[in-house]
Image (tube, rainbow, N blue to C red):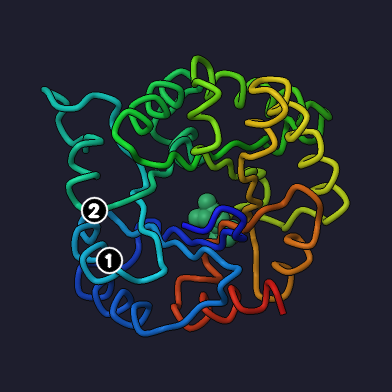
Amino acid sequence: MERDAIWVGTSWKMNKGPAASVAAANELARMSFPAAIQPFVIPPFTSLKDVCDRLSGSRVAVGAQNMHWQDEGAWTGEISPTMISECGAELVEIGHSERRTYFGETDHTVNLKVHAALRHGLRPLVCIGDTADEYSYSVTNETLARQLKVALHGVSEDDVPQVLIAYEPVWAIGASGRPADAAFVERTHNYLRKVLINIAGSSAGSAIKLLYGGSVTQDNAAGYVALPHVNGVFVGRAAWNVEHFQALAEGVIA
Ligand SMILES: O=C(COP(=O)(O)O)[C@@H](O)CO
């Protein structure tokens, strides 16, 4: 993975069964992406191994959408870091707002998962974000600082640069969301960088990749990436079609 690359990725969320995932992965494997871009896709668990196999040796990194923090055990329905590694994934998404809102993910479990991912050589992609209420009460920064501090608690300075952070306002995600305006993203990412430097020190805190997500499209992606401290975008709906994904990735640096 290119150290200074701009990260452009998509989670397919609960879309694409095994056949559709394999077809998409085959298309992605044939595509080229600008050298400055680090593309990644995050398929559902049922397709993880197939997608990893098809994209192995390509420029597209593959991740899982969630995981448990234990290596094994009586945790019905869960997937462990060892299972994810064995599939060939390099990344794991942790703490997406849909998991926090509907499946009981907490700052504490996010922290356990970050440590587990790093122990297993997986790159954690930690999602943080303020709710619409928090935004309207102007406590966005307080919420994000808390989420970041707990997520990275106990992570060594050496490991911190492995972590990717996606700032995704909950009010910006999905069909009912509205994209955050660029000035707000700029202010918020500046603040996040300061918090990261405060947590991890200047060198490690500056090295962490900070992505923006929430209603990113081909029209607005380049505007976000042009902002200071925005090192990429994490995209949902606008990148589920692989040709749209490629176009969005190319457009980010056009
Ligand atoms: O949830 C995300 C953004 O979804 P959009 O459909 O782009 O609003 C982000 O985590 C990518 O999955």
Looking at the picture, how far across and down is residue 132, in whole percent? 71, 38
Circle 1 packing at 10 Å, graded few (<14), some (14-19), many (20+), is some
Question: Which residue corresponds to the image point at 50% horizontal and 20% vertical from the top-left?
Answer: 156
Q: Is residue 29 left or right of residue 207?
A: left
Q: Determine contact: label 1, label 2, CB under 8 Å.
A: yes
Number of callouts in the render?
Answer: 2
Query: Looking at this rendering, what residue extends furthest in the right direction?
Result: 183
Q: Looking at this view, is 178 or 239 the one in front? A: 239
Does mark 2's beta carbon lie closer than 8 Å to ligand 1? no
Q: CA distance from mark 1 to mark 2?
A: 8 Å
Query: Looking at this rendering, what residue extends furthest in the left direction?
Result: 74
Instruction: For mark 1, give the secondary structure.
Output: loop
Query: What residue is pinned by disc 1?
Result: 56
Looking at the picture, how far across and down is residue 163, in whole percent? 51, 37
Upstream in the sequence, badge 1 or badge 2?
A: 1
Q: Looking at this view, is 200 or 180 the one in front? A: 200
Amino acid of disc 1: Ser
Question: Which residue corresponds to the image point at 49% horizontal and 21% vertical from the top-left?
Answer: 155
Quadrant of res 201:
top right
Circle 2 packing at 10 Å, graded few (<14), some (14-19), many (20+), is many
Q: Quadrant of the C terminus?
A: bottom right
Looking at the picture, how far across and down is residue 36, in whole percent? 61, 68
Instruction: For mark 2, give the secondary structure.
Output: loop
Q: Looking at this view, is 44 or 25 the one in front? A: 25
Query: What residue is pinned by disc 2?
Result: 88
Q: Is residue 10 left or right of residue 196?
A: left
Question: Which residue corresponds to the image point at 56% horizontal and 56% vertical from the top-left?
Answer: 234
Q: Is residue 221 left or right of residue 188?
A: left
Amino acid of disc 2: Gly
Quadrant of res 117:
top left
Question: Which residue corresponds to the image point at 59% horizontal and 45% vertical from the top-left?
Answer: 166
